[in-house]
Image (spheres, rainbow, N blue to C red):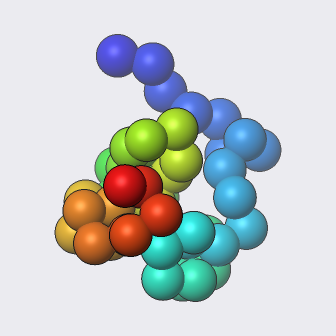
């Protein structure tokens, strides 16, 4: 499994806008889905931009 460097993460979640500093899933690295990284699994599922 590939890990994401913190420097490669967005400043905020593309789904809900939560700042990176507040992410808790995956040790603060969030969850990847559809080529984007989200703050949580729930947020990744809810984001309509993912299609």
Task: Decide if residue 24 is in sight here.
Answer: no
Corner quadrant of residue 30: bottom left
Task: Decide if residue 20 is in sight here.
Answer: yes
Q: Is residue 43 above or below residue 26?
A: below
Q: Is residue 8 above or below residue 17?
A: above
**Image point 72% across, 41% down: which residue?**
8
Q: Position of 6 compared to 38: left or right?
A: right
**Image point 38% across, 69% down: which residue?**
47
Q: Position of 42 compared to 49: left or right?
A: left
Q: Position of 38 compared to 7: left or right?
A: left
Return the residue nearer the eye: 35 or 25.
Answer: 35
Q: Quadrant of the C terminus?
A: bottom left
Where does the image place residue 12, in percent across and percent down from the top left? Answer: 64, 72
Taking the view exactly as shown, the residue that stands out farthest to the top is 1
Where does the image place residue 40, in percent across and percent down from the top left? Answer: 32, 65
**Image point 73% across, 67% down: which residue?**
11
Return the residue nearer the eye: 42 or 34.
Answer: 34
Corner quadrant of residue 20: bottom right
Where does the image place residue 13, in percent across and percent down from the top left? Answer: 55, 70
Q: Is residue 10 above or below residue 8?
A: below
Return the residue nearer the eye: 45 or 24.
Answer: 45
**Image point 47% across, 64% down: which residue?**
49
Where does the image place residue 35, in percent across and percent down from the top left? Answer: 52, 38
């Amino acid at each position: 499994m590939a890990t994401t460097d913190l420097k490669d993460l967005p400043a905020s979640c593309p789904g809900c806008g939560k700042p990176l500093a507040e992410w808790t899933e995956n040790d603060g690295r969030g969850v990847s889905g559809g080529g984007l990284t989200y703050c949580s699994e729930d947020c990744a599922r809810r984001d309509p931009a993912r299609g």
